[in-house]
Image (cartoon, helix red, strand yellow):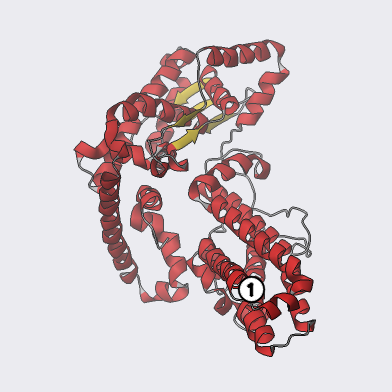
Amino acid sequence: MSAENQGGGNELDLLTDFKKGYVYFLTGFQNLVGSFLQFLSTGLTEANKREILSFRKNLDQELDKSQKKIKEIIFNLDEKHMYAQVRKEYSRYFSRNLDEASRDDYVQFHLVFEMLRYFYIESKEGWIFLRDAVSNAKFSDPDFQTNALLNYRILPALERLNQLEIFLKRMSYILQIDNPNYLTEYKPTKPKFRDRVIYRLSTVFDENLYDKPASLDPEDSGIVYKADEVIQKENEESDKKKEWANQKAKLKEEGATTYIQAYGKYTWNSDQHYFFRYEQDKYLAEKALFKTAISMDLHLGADEQVLRAELIRSLTSTEKKNKSPEDFEVEYQNFLKQFFQFCENVVLMNMMIPNQVKYVFLFHLGPSHFYMIAKKFLMEVNTGYIHARGTDGKKVIRVIPGEYVKKHVIDYWNEIILPNVGEEKNNLALLKKLTEMIEEKYKEISKLTIQKYDELDEEIKNSKPRDLIFREHMNEWMGAANIIIFKRFVKNKSF
């Protein structure tokens, strides 16, 4: 079924605001509500106040609720908070903890869908009540009723909710939501994952969305690992359970903390970008992998044939088999230190940051964004993986230990970044100068990205919407690590 038939006219024409991002649409709604509140506080005559008295309480409650809900969603859509939500909720979606960006995108896409869906359900009924209350009330001034309340304020809000309804229908089609009452029921929806689907905002605007088959691809593939399974296994065995408790107690005695607050003196350098944490249980589960490790991928680049040959050699190598868990762990820690330096050098070179201000730049980049860059590089280079025996003793699992890496990012911050940054971290003028440099680099790389698009064959450019092509190639054209940096520092981004 085409978009025209599904929506009664080309429904994509009604979703223009969404093309600029979720936040753009929500901010427009927020501005409408704010303007309405301002009008109610300063623009009413005494007669107006009397005539809306019967529904004034409902009006105030609906406007206040909308403001709070929109503010909450925008807060949660912030990259830092969204990333944390995806990590927290991942295990509810997949029984296996594969390091695949498409699965992270899928989880994030559904979390955003649920936030917008709840907002729609909570708002639609209230705004319809207000429309009917105003339409049925008697006013001495028809213009106040028709224009000031209905045409300029209430109906535009309902129009935006109708746009949101269309948007949610397209999202639900992508997510394969079966429940036909998902726009009226608070019951959580159950999406279905398909390997070949791109779970990004751009997919919503695919003109052929409804023409594509809804058949599902297999949900699982590849070597797997789930930290929670390791935790459960440890808890089931009494001797290992005792050792587990001893490890946690030892960490507590040593004063180990699971987070870092790399704050400055002021509010502008003490927000969420300077805070970072890891989950201790999952860290300990990943640390336990060194006890059953067979080999590790600790290189800065190799093709697939080399990697496969190295794995075969490692499985039959006496030297590898004779390594102790401590040897494996020390080797991995040394690798992380070198890899973090590698990440530093790449981002500093890409952004053209002078060496004398590199530590203040990294301080403001923050540990969470640094971790995202490190994780992206590990996956792109296909390194940092631990090969270990699974909990059943038969399967070989292959995993990048995310929480273990997070813990060592915090160590890296405490040992390298913070001791070298000094008082310049509180220099707002220096931060602004660094931001200007990054914005210039963003403009430069954006021009190259547009050039890459212009160089595509006309057949490719005509096959999909321009925005969709850009989003599909953004990591390749702009650089995945660069995008992470731009999201941190640059306002009014186009991705």
Picture quadrant of residue 444: bottom left
Residue 316 visible from this viewpoint: yes
Q: Residue at x 78, y 77 (%)?
A: 133
Q: Residues within 10 Å of mark 1 (few under 14, many from 20)?
A: many
Please, which residue is most extreme toward the front here? 46
Picture quadrant of residue 301: top left
Name the quadrant of the N terminus: bottom right
Question: Is 250 placed left or right of 440 in the picture?
Answer: right
The number of discs equals 1
- Compared to residue 320, the image places residue 93 above or below, namely below
Residue 301 visible from this viewpoint: no
Instruction: Tell me which amino acid carries mark 1.
Output: Ala
- Compared to residue 60, the image places residue 411 above or below, namely above
Question: SS of the residue at dot 1?
Answer: helix
Picture quadrant of residue 109: bottom right
Q: Position of residue 202 (x, y in %)?
A: 51, 65
Q: Nearer the viewer, residue 178 or 158?
A: 158
Q: Residue at x 57, y 14 (%)?
A: 247
- Compared to residue 301, the image places residue 487 above or below, namely below
Q: Position of residue 123 (x, y in %)?
A: 70, 65
| Residue topped by disc 1 | 157
Q: Position of residue 283 (x, y in %)?
A: 54, 26
Question: Is 232 placed left or right of 479 in the picture?
Answer: right
Q: Position of residue 117 (x, y in %)?
A: 68, 61
Q: Residue at x 51, y 23 (%)?
A: 257
Question: Is 294 placed left or right of 36 in the picture?
Answer: left
